[in-house]
Image (spheres, grey):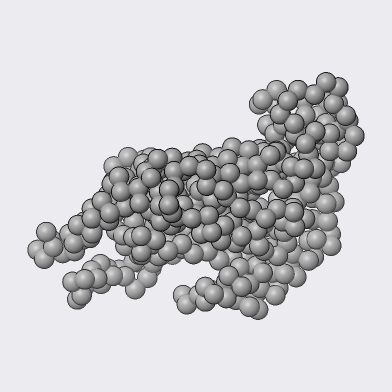
């Protein structure tokens, strides 16, 4: 079982990450994790924070001589911007704190953010107490945790991918042959160059208007074995777990497995993925289509796992919306906190991390193992049984 936790505030001293349950002897290093953290920081439409932070996850525990020990992996990501917030975000009590600049109480509530429910739930009189943890800065910690999970999945041949399929009103052309190198080079992580240019235009238009823009991302996990997850209990269904993980990402408002909403108007004969006759004993149970998104009955079916999620335009606007004051309830303009215009491109990297954590946990639930060698032996033994029952035993 893999468990993971994050701690830290947007402008605090840093982010803490603990990943527990990774088997021993998995090769991992800070450079590998840093590569994925760097991918998260890219993307057209990002705000000024990305010019300040150069995210690096320092491994503090659970790794020796480049390999995991089977004990919890602890990591720290320093917030470079902390130097500008030492009083506003101080841990120790400050008598009569300044009410100037960053130290001023935040009382102007932002519609669409955690500001109002957070202050009401926890009894705060300063919105900053909620907005700091609710900030998408926390997703850097998720990517660090997810990078460990991705490194684990790679031992079993599983590869995580993501690409942007829409920003604003612009949709990329659908294709089964995605140039992943082009996606990584694209400023909006879109393989359709024509659509990518229009997406950049959408972001520029929103920025000029002091507004924000959302979009849709697709996550693909390749080479996932058949049988992860389960149909026997609601909380073990792999599609439910993936959906929950993706829905937990800041500003995500919709999740689908595979094409999702695109197929609800079709008849059943047009939606299912026909199973091909087994002609290759080493590669059974093939499909020509993957409309199920690689999941049937709450379990992976051997096809690539595909999930899409939609992100609303983020709530912090340079041209703030009308709102109310936390103290008086009277009309004000909503608070503005430095933010992105569009967070869709980096969301794919975050989505990869979240799906990787779910798949890694499901894989360990299925195959177990206290070391990578043991997990691989169990996996390979299982794979030998996956096929027609009169041939495979």
Question: Residue 216 sits in which quadrant?
Answer: bottom right
Q: Picture coordinates of residue 108 (x, y %)? A: 82, 36
Q: Which quadrant does the N terminus fall into?
A: top left
Q: Nearer the viewer, residue 303 or 331?
A: 303
Work out whether residue 319 can be spotted: yes
Residue that appears at 72% across and 56% down: 50
Q: Position of residue 4 (x, y in %)?
A: 47, 41
- At horizontal 74% and vertical 42% (from top left) the residue drawn is 82
Q: In x, y percent, where is residue 188?
A: 65, 67
Please state if 75 lies on the left or on the right of 296 as rendered: right
The quadrant the C terminus occupies is bottom left
- In percent of the image, x 77 and y 29: which residue is there? 126
The residue lying furthest to the right in this view is: 100
Observer-nearest residue: 156 or 321? 156
Residue extending farthest top: 95
User: From what the image shows, is residue 47 above or below residue 391?
Assistant: above
**Which residue is most to the front?**
65
Q: Is residue 165 visible?
A: no
Name the side, left or right, on which 237 lies relative to 174: left
Q: Indicate left or right for 17 with 152 as reference.
A: right
Instruction: Quadrant for residue 385, please give it.
Output: bottom left
> Residue 328, relative to residue 170: is it above or below?
above
- Left or right, 228 with reference to 278: right
Pick the residue in front: 268 or 351: 351
Question: Which residue of the protein is positioned furthest toward the left in this rendering?
Answer: 390
Give the vertical position of 81 relative to 387 (above or below): above
Residue 209 percent coordinates (x, y): 84, 59
């Amino acid at each position: 079982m893999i468990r993971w936790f994050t701690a830290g505030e947007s402008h605090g001293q840093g982010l803490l990450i603990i990943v527990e349950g990774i088997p021993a002897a998995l090769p991992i290093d800070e450079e590998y994790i840093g590569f994925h953290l760097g991918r998260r920081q890219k993307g057209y439409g990002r705000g000024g924070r990305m010019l300040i932070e150069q995210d690096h996850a320092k491994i503090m525990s659970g790794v020796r001589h480049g390999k995991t020990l089977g004990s919890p992996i602890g990591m720290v990501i320093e917030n470079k911007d902390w130097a500008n917030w030492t009083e506003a975000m101080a841990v120790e009590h400050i008598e009569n704190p300044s009410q100037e600049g960053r130290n001023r109480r935040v009382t102007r509530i932002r519609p669409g953010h955690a500001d109002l429910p957070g202050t009401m739930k926890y009894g705060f009189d300063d919105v900053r107490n909620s907005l700091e943890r609710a900030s998408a800065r926390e997703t850097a910690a998720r990517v660090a945790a997810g990078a460990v999970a991705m490194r684990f999945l790679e031992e079993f041949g599983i590869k995580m991918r993501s690409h942007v399929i829409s920003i604003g009103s612009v949709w990329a052309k659908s294709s089964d042959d995605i140039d992943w190198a082009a996606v990584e080079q694209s400023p909006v992580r879109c393989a359709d160059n024509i659509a990518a240019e229009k997406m950049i235009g959408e972001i520029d238009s929103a920025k000029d208007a002091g507004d924000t823009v959302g979009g849709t991302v697709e996550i693909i996990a390749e080479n996932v074995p058949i049988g992860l997850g389960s149909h026997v209990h609601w909380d073990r269904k792999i599609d439910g777990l993936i959906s929950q993980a993706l829905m937990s990402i800041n500003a995500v408002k919709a999740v689908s497995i595979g094409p999702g909403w695109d197929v609800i108007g079709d008849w059943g004969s047009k939606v299912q993925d026909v199973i091909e006759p087994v002609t290759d004993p080493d590669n059974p149970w093939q499909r020509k289509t993957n409309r199920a998104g690689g999941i049937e009955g709450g379990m992976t079916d051997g096809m690539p796992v595909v999930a899409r999620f939609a992100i609303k335009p983020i709530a912090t606007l340079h041209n703030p919306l009308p709102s109310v004051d936390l103290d008086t309830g009277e009309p004000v303009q909503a608070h503005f906190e430095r933010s992105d215009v569009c967070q869709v491109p980096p969301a794919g990297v975050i989505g990869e991390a979240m799906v990787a954590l779910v798949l890694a946990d499901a894989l360990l639930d299925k195959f177990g193992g206290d070391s990578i060698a043991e997990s691989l032996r169990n996996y390979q033994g299982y794979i030998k049984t996956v096929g027609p029952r009169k041939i495979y035993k």
